[in-house]
Image: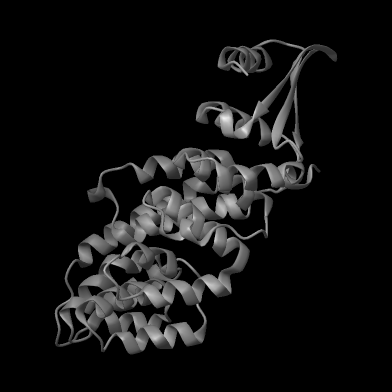
Amino acid sequence: MALTWLSAAGALVRHCKGYTLDINWDVDAEQFGLSLLKDGDLLRRARMEVEESFGYDLLFIFRELEKRPLAEFEDALHDIVNTVVDTQVNEAALRLLMQLGSQIPIDPQFLDNNVLATRRTAVEYERRRNAEGLEVELLRRIGNQDEFYVELLGRMPLSNATLQALTNALSGSERQRQQAACVLAMQASREQVLRLLTGPDALIRHEAANCVSFHRDFDSILERLMMFRGTYPIRGTKTLLAMSRRKNQLVSRLKEMSVEQKRTRLELIQTAPWGLWDKGMRFWVNEQIFQSWASPNSSNASGE
């Protein structure tokens, strides 16, 4: 199908009154059926084969699917994830499947994809589908050379067994201590986080300070930290106070926004210079974006 036809059809639907584009999925042929209508009358019908389509064609189709009951297109989206070699398309399809709440497993190789954005989306999809299994898999990777999975484990609610395993890792190698300290600073109890921030190990203190702004009780931890008088110096308290103010301001603004507005605002923060937000806050922003996909107002999932 010519790209020019789909582009023209999309422009008509977006800008001209009375035009609509019907989309259906042929499971046997593994292709989309597209029908352009004007005031209910058919103007043109076309077929769109997934394997022969350009990535931007599929991304346009995805934008149209967001307006429809996604359950009708679950098979189509999984077929696209498994057959199309385009990281942007894969990522967009996985986000729609996450929004739908799909329970169909994906290829485990996606969890180690070379493109970090696609890898993150694949891990988040698995978290939505099978959080318990993913927690075990991510814990297994703590202490390895690739620090990518530290964020993804730290953003998840963790079992007591995982928290204990991370606590044990604080006595391990330098890399294990560093990565475990970050995850624990994001998810452990306030008492344990305070011990990380004020303990004798400078590496653990430093990494905990980098990640603690993610914690749900960040302000409470910070308040108690300001009253601490101990042997080991606490560095960066001014930075933590500034991060607390920024986080609270951002939370207040987000409460006034729709889901789409929140997502756009948070995605802009993802591209902001690193000096404005520390590691923990960047992880927090990524988590809010994940929640906007995993727990949206799910009207388009059911069609209600």
Rendered position, 188 above or below 286? below
Q: Residue at x 30, y 59 (%)?
A: 279
Q: x, y (%) of residue 32? A: 70, 31
Residue at x 32% of width, y 72% of height: 182
Image-based side of 259 in relation to 113, left or right = right
Using the image as rendered, state which of residue 102 and residue 195 is in the foreground: 102
Asked whether residue 262 is in view, the answer is: no
Answer with left or right where residue 241 lies relative to residue 76: left
Q: Residue at x 46, y 83 (%)?
A: 162
What's the colour scheme?
Answer: one colour
Please give left or right for residue 181 compared with residue 25 in the image: left
Image quarter where the C terminus lies is: top right
Left or right? Give the position of 299 relative to 285.
right
Q: Is residue 297 visible?
A: yes
Q: Quadrant of residue 106?
A: bottom right
- The N terminus - image quarter: top right
Identify the residue shown where x is 71% and y is 24%.
47
Q: Position of residue 155 (x, y in %)?
A: 45, 66
Q: Position of residue 78 (x, y in %)?
A: 63, 48
- The relative height of residue 197 versus residue 20 in the rendered view (above or below) is below
**Quick one: 42 or 86, which is closer to the camera?**
86
| Residue 300 position within the rendered picture, expressed as x and y whole percent measured from the top left | 72, 42
